[in-house]
């Protein structure tokens, strides 16, 4: 693929910054508040305790836990799944409670509760008027949310168990992760018309995606494991990494990660030149790979067992999350891009991801 020039990468970086979990509206600077400079940690919780959100402060190098409950005097809900920042609001997807809680970023005061979902997973803004939400219910859908009144306005049928989305030049890539079954597709949606315009065939159960400095789409495929009645493995397909041309959606290359281990998370460095993959129930370690490498790395970037992780767009620091079990608190680790652990902090139960604010 022809490499993007420097100005092209600058435009690409701006696009990425606008649509990732670190999304924000640059025309609306953050109001000053206790949660202004830092990141939000999403803690899944369990069916008894419920989910929660923690806040890491850059200035204080400290963590505050259960901020939604403390500010709004009520529980967040069951199984917090993800958090996306946009237009000075934080959108918290609460999977088990089938809702999205919308709060002010700077003080976490409640703004609205969006209901009517069926196992929602992830939210991304399309523009100031609408956002997309993946949900497993109804055989897999994108739910379109009106951001003016915080109500559901329409749906788009996609594949089974849709997971994360990625926006690139008005195209929305949707990873159909299979849910409790199996799927092997990436759907491409034209966000102007809310229509599926292409389907890309990849490995089993794609979970996560990034786009690098050259405009290449990377897709992490979890693989598929089928169990018998006694929980013995009946069938298992490998976890894989795919490189895809975003101009014609042809596959450039693919790599087998493992025949029997299944990573769930894929992230990219701020300069778009290195990817990180790993984390999850059955993988744990994090691997780092240059986008021009032709082979997967032999050794992990971090050999600790992490449930989830994200990369900070401010400086490339990794925020890695350890969930020892789902009955006790987990831990946040801040890791320098060279692998040095900068600090560790106690957070809530089952931490799975970090909602970054801005680049």
Image: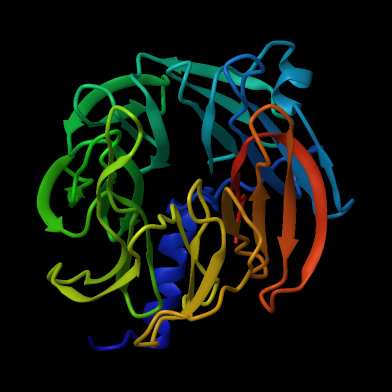
Q: Place residue 263 in its image quadrant.
A: bottom left
Q: Is residue 135 above or below residue 63?
A: above
Nearer-the-camera pick, 99 or 351 = 351
In the image, residue 144 lies at what x, y percent? Answer: 29, 30
Q: Is residue 178 above or below residue 275?
A: above
In the image, residue 161 lies at what x, y percent? Answer: 27, 36
Q: Is residue 51 above or below residue 193?
A: above
In the image, residue 150 lies at what x, y percent? Answer: 42, 21
Q: Is residue 356 left or right of residue 206?
A: right
Nearer-the-camera pick, 39 or 78 = 78
Q: From the image, which quarter does the N terminus lie in?
A: bottom left
Numbered circles on residues, count? 0
Q: At 74% from the left edge and 11% from the top edge, which residue is drawn?
A: 73
Q: Colour mode? A: rainbow
In the image, residue 23 lies at what x, y percent? Answer: 51, 49
Residue positioned most to the right: 60
Q: Place residue 196 in its image quadrant.
A: top left
Q: Is residue 148 left or right of residue 316?
A: left
Q: At 48% from the left edge and 16% from the top edge, which residue is drawn?
A: 97
Q: Place residue 149 in its image quadrant.
A: top left
Q: At 21% from the left edge and 22% from the top edge, which residue is drawn?
A: 138
Q: From the image, which quarter does the C terminus lie in?
A: bottom right
Residue positioned most to the top: 74
Nearer-the-camera pick, 188 or 349 = 349
Q: Is residue 37 left or right of residue 88?
A: right
Q: Is residue 127 left or right of residue 142?
A: right
């Amino acid at each position: 693929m022809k490499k993007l020039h420097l100005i092209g990468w600058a435009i690409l970086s701006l696009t990425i910054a606008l649509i990732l979990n670190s999304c924000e509206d640059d025309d609306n600077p953050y109001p000053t508040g206790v949660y202004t400079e830092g990141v939000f940690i999403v803690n899944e919780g369990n069916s008894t305790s419920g989910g929660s959100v923690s806040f890491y402060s850059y200035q204080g190098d400290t963590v505050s836990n259960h901020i939604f409950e403390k500010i709004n005097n009520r529980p967040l809900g069951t199984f917090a799944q993800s958090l996306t920042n946009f237009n000075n609001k934080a959108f918290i997807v609460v999977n088990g409670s089938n809702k999205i809680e919308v709060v002010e970023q700077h003080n976490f005061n409640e703004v609205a509760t969006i209901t009517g979902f069926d196992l929602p997973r992830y939210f991304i803004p399309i523009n100031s008027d609408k956002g997309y939400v993946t949900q497993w219910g109804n055989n897999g859908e994108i739910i379109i949310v009106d951001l003016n009144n915080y109500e559901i306005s329409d749906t788009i049928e996609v594949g089974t168990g849709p997971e994360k989305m990625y926006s690139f030049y008005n195209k929305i890539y949707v990873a159909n992760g299979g849910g409790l079954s199996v799927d092997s597709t990436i759907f491409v949606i034209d966000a102007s018309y809310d229509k599926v315009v292409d389907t890309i065939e990849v490995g089993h159960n794609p979970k996560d995606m990034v786009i690098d400095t050259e405009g290449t789409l990377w897709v992490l495929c979890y693989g598929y494991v089928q169990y018998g009645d006694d929980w013995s493995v009946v069938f298992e397909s490998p976890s894989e990494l795919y490189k895809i041309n975003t101009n014609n959606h042809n596959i450039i290359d693919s790599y087998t990660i493992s025949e029997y281990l299944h990573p769930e998370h894929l992230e990219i460095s701020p300069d778009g030149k290195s990817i990180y993959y790993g984390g999850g129930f059955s993988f744990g370690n994090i691997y780092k790979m240059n986008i021009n490498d032709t082979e997967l790395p032999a050794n992990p970037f971090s050999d600790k067992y992490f449930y989830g992780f994200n990369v900070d767009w401010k400086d490339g620091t990794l925020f890695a999350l350890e969930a020892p079990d789902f009955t006790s608190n987990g831990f946040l680790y801040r890791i320098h891009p060279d692998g040095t652990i900068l600090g560790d902090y106690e957070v809530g139960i089952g931490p799975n991801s970090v909602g970054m604010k801005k680049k």
